[in-house]
Image: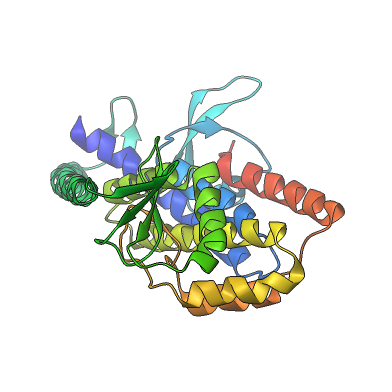
Amino acid sequence: MLSDIFYWVLNMSISAAIAGCIVLLLAKIKRLPRGIICALMVIPFLRMWLPFGMGSEYSLMSLISKVTTRTVFIYDGKIPVTMTNFTMAANSYFPIVYKTNILESVFRIAAIVWIIISAALLITMVIIYTVTKSELKDARLLRENIYVSDKITSPAVYGIFREKIILPREYDADELKFILMHENAHIRRKDNLWRILAIVTACIHWFNPLTWLFLKSFLTNSELACDEAVLRKCPENEKKNYATTLLNCTESKNLYVSAFGGAKLRVRIERIVSYKKFSALSITAIAILAAAVAYTLLTNAT
């Protein structure tokens, strides 16, 4: 049973790797809004959880299936439901019957190694999260959901459902406006929840090195997307002040929080300085492009 689960986890991971690489290439287009890139980056993570999907002749997997993979049909109706089978190591499915005894042994051993390391990573992450949360219990309330603590060096959002903005003990009141705008953008986007889900996904698919690359890209683009959310509300002449505020904040090393200094500062400063607001027509065109990309990457071959 465990080897059967790992068989499909491996196939999901391969599908996710292909979809994620396409999204990473799109992320190289600097003019695309980072919020759109974050939304598209959800696609490979969804691929890592969904073993089946709607079949479509316009799917990227339809093109790939002609040479490297096989489609397993769950429901062969008007709108087929299929599973993408990259490994092609079995003669039949549900339950899986492997082509050779050697393949069966390999998948059995691999499944045991996979579940042990996944469990160890998840337990480690839970411990780190618990310790981090307990260290901030003595944070002092400033107002509303804003707290101050001497245990952090950079402003950040803590919590998943009842988020708190926690500031370091020494902060510049003149810069507080931009800090709160940035952190409230994280709260509106539920970035801490998405962050936890992405980390859990990476722990499950630890064996795929691209998973960690996708996680890093997702976290970085989340910060950039919040920068853009701030800049959309700021007059042009305040971009320099926002960039200066960012430079004055220490980069956060905490994996579980959405921090004001939580991504590469040089990249963020460059994007802030060069940022230009999008027209309604541009946003519409980009949204249509994103929807088309999502459709081709989330659907399976027929």
Locate residue 92: give its quadrant: top left
Which residue is found at the position 61% from the left and 51% from the top? Answer: 63
Which residue is found at the position 70% from the left and 57% from the top? Answer: 233
Depicted 227 relative to depicted 65: above or below: below
Q: How is the image coloured?
A: rainbow
Depicted 52 relative to depicted 120: above or below: above
Q: Does residue 105 appear to the left or right of 197 in the view shown?
A: left
Give the total of numbered labels: 0
Q: Does residue 20 appear to the left or right of 36 in the view shown?
A: left
Which residue is found at the position 49% from the left and 28% from the top? Answer: 73
Q: Does residue 60 appear to the left or right of 234 in the view shown?
A: left
Image quarter in which the C terminus is found: top right
Residue 248 image offset from top left, x and y in percent: 46, 76
Image quarter in which the N terminus is found: top left
Locate residue 189: give its quadrant: top right
Residue 10 image offset from top left, x and y in percent: 33, 46
Note whether residue 254 is visible: yes
Residue 83 image offset from top left, x and y in percent: 46, 34
Residues 126 and 248: in front is 248
Note whether residue 67 is visible: no
Residue 209 image offset from top left, x and y in percent: 33, 62
Residues 266 and 143: in front is 143
